[in-house]
């Protein structure tokens, strides 16, 4: 399939699978997934039901700016004295408050990570080594049989130098910039790049 074939994407059935999307859309989704992994994997591992997990969450929520508001937003209506007792471990929250404390912790952590995109950029740039991108071609099963390219395969690439702009584009929802960056990425596939303008999935090794 030539690059020109994508000007009429869906003409031969590729659009029958909603998972077949332009690379710019898949790249944005992949960045969001990688950011979520970074938030979760860098967070507190112990469950809130454990003494250690509760203590760590309360320490974060009572020493980090915005913690009190995060607790309130999650539905915690306890008095400051009760919250201090939870933080010290002298009182234990009820199950509903434990769940709300966990929600408040993850919401605040996510907010703080999103407020500091530099850390995510650094994570993806990986000290200049970049991030592995795994490109999955569109689902060919929905394409009209004479137009299928069953020889398309998953293509791995080690991608450098685009991540600062990619993170900025993701956070601002700039699809035009993501499209420009996607064109840069797939240009490394040489003559086959046009077949990966649309994809079924993009995975980031980060």
Image (tube, helix red, strand yellow):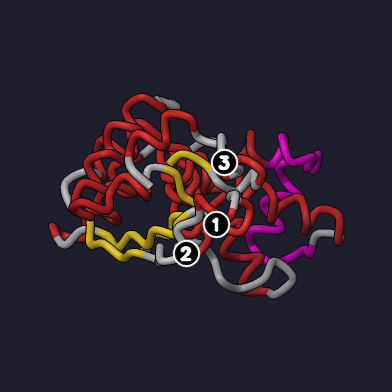
C-alpha separation, residue under disc 1 versus residue under disc 3: 10 Å
Crowding at label 1, few (<14), some or many (≥20) Cα neighbours within 10 Å?
some
Q: Is residue 197 visible?
A: yes
- Disc 1 vs disc 3: which is toward the camera? 3
Front residue of 132 and 200: 200
**First of labels 1, 3 by sequence position:** 3
Residue furthest front in the image: 146
**Contact? badges 1 and 2 (CB < 8 Å):** yes
Identify the secondary structure beneath mark 2. loop
**Residue 93 locus on image (x, y percent):** 80, 59
Crowding at label 3, few (<14), some or many (≥20) Cα neighbours within 10 Å?
some
- The residue singled out by tag 2 in the image is 150
Left or right of residue 116: residue 43: right
| Picture quarter with the C terminus | bottom left
Identify the secondary structure beneath mark 1. helix
Above or below 60: residue 198? above
The residue range painted magenta reads: 71-92
- The residue singled out by tag 1 in the image is 140
């Amino acid at each position: 399939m030539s690059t020109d074939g994508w000007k009429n994407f869906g003409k031969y059935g590729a659009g029958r699978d909603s998972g077949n999307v332009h690379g710019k859309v898949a790249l944005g989704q992949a960045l969001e997934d990688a950011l979520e992994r970074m938030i979760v994997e860098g967070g507190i591992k112990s469950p809130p039901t454990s003494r250690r997990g509760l203590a760590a969450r309360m320490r974060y929520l009572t020493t980090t700016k915005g913690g009190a508001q995060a607790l309130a937003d999650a539905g915690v209506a306890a008095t400051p004295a009760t919250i201090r007792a939870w933080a010290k471990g002298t009182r234990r929250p009820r199950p509903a408050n434990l769940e709300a404390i966990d929600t408040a912790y993850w919401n605040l952590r996510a907010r703080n990570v999103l407020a500091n995109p530099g850390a995510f950029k650094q994570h993806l740039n990986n000290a200049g080594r970049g991030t592995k991108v795994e490109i999955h071609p569109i689902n060919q099963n929905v394409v009209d049989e004479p137009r299928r390219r069953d020889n398309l395969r998953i293509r791995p690439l080690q991608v450098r130098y685009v991540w600062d702009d990619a993170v900025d584009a993701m956070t601002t929802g700039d699809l035009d910039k993501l499209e420009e960056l996607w064109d840069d990425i797939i240009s490394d596939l040489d003559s086959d790049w046009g077949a990966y303008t649309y994809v079924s999935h993009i995975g980031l090794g980060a």
